[in-house]
């Protein structure tokens, strides 16, 4: 079974891409909405939270865990890889390298949580591919608005209106692809980059090199939300909208 985790609903934007490639996998999606947002928590808090989730996923039989949260990946993946050396962790990262590969000279805006932008892991990536035409924009509170299905337009107008002539927008938080239209409303016709394709490619690579069986007769998806809020589950299925009718083992 493949585990997928995020601080809430955002990881769905990654899971959709995974499902395109593994349409009949067995998955458990852990939405940690009770601890949302991760973005302004301390490193210690995030590590503690992740440690608890990973223990649960391992107890459920996950040997592969996709960290579908940029903040959690940036801050916690090294700790997790060291502590759980038998588990394969596939960690998303902001798609800044994609800008380098596609439009390196373009004026670029990286939107992410404060935790991601200040993390050593992200700063290493940023300095490696720095095009000297990039603005790093911590979007404090944005993931929380998206998680709670609130109107993001006033927030976006407030933080984005001063940025003109942006060509590339890196969506460095898995919640942000859900509000592309809102961002376009303010910045115009920009090109978006997110980590979903990259992390899916890495997942497939790891599954193949370790010869792990990941295709079954039926798609099976178990959804867990830490706040046990039924509206989260409803939104999850609406956003995921899988082509096949998945089996849904009873949630906790
Ligand atoms: N989806 C998480 C990320 O990619 C949201 C962060 C948060 O909970 O603040 O960073």
Image (tube, helix red, strand yellow):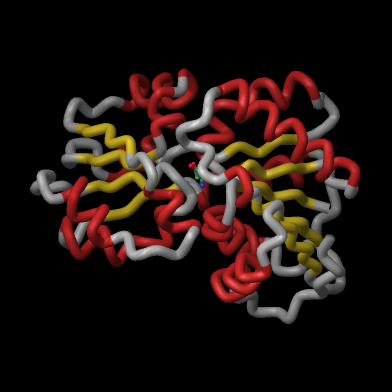
Q: Quadrant of residue 189?
A: bottom left
The structure residue drawn at horizontal position 22% and vertical position 33%, both measured from the top left corner, is 135
Residue 201 visible in rendering: no
> Residue 4: image x %, image y %?
69, 50
The quadrant holding residue 237 is bottom right
In the image, residue 190 sits, relative to residue 250, either above or below, namely: above
Quadrant, the C terminus: bottom right
The number of callouts visible is 0
Residue 94 appears in view? yes
Q: Residue at x 55, y 70 (%)?
A: 239
Please indicate whether residue 71 sits to the left or right of residue 241 in the image: left
For image coordinates 64% across by 79% down, the residue present is 243
In the picture, measured across the screen, residue 56 lies left or right of residue 168, that is right
Indicate whether 213 appears above or below 134.
below
The relative height of residue 6 versus residue 39 in the rendered view (above or below) is: below
Please provide percent x and percent y for residue 53: 75, 40
x and y, in percent, of residue 96 in the image: 37, 37
Relative height, residue 153 to residue 35 (above, below): below
Q: Is residue 165 left or right of residue 41?
A: left
In the rendering, at what x and y percent does residue 16 appear? 58, 63
Q: Quadrant location of residue 90?
A: top right
Closest to the observer, 72 or 252: 252
Q: Residue at x 86, y 41 (%)?
A: 58
Nearest the camera: 102 or 31?
Answer: 31
């Amino acid at each position: 079974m493949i585990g997928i985790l995020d601080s809430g609903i955002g990881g769905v934007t990654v899971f959709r891409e995974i499902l395109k490639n593994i349409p009949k996998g067995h998955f458990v999606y852990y939405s940690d909405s009770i601890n949302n947002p991760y973005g302004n928590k301390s490193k210690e808090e995030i590590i503690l939270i992740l440690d608890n989730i990973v223990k649960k996923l391992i107890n459920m039989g996950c040997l592969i865990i996709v960290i579908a949260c940029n903040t959690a990946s940036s801050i916690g993946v090294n700790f997790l890889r060291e502590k759980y050396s038998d588990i394969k962790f596939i960690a998303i990262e902001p798609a800044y390298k994609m800008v380098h590969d596609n439009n390196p000279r373009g004026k670029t805006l990286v939107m992410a949580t404060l935790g991601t932008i200040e993390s050593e892991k992200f700063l290493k990536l940023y300095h490696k591919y720095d095009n000297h035409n990039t603005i790093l924009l911590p979007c404090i509170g944005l993931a929380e608005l998206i998680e709670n299905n609130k109107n993001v337009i006033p927030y976006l107008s407030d933080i984005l209106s001063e940025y003109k002539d942006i060509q590339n927008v890196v969506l460095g938080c898995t919640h942000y692809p859900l509000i592309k239209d809102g961002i376009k409303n303010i910045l115009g016709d920009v090109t978006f980059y997110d980590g979903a394709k990259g992390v899916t490619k890495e997942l497939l690579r790891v599954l193949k090199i370790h010869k792990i069986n990941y295709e079954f007769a039926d798609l099976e998806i178990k959804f867990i939300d830490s706040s046990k809020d039924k509206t989260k589950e409803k939104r999850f299925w609406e956003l995921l909208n899988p082509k096949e009718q998945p089996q849904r083992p009873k949630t906790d």
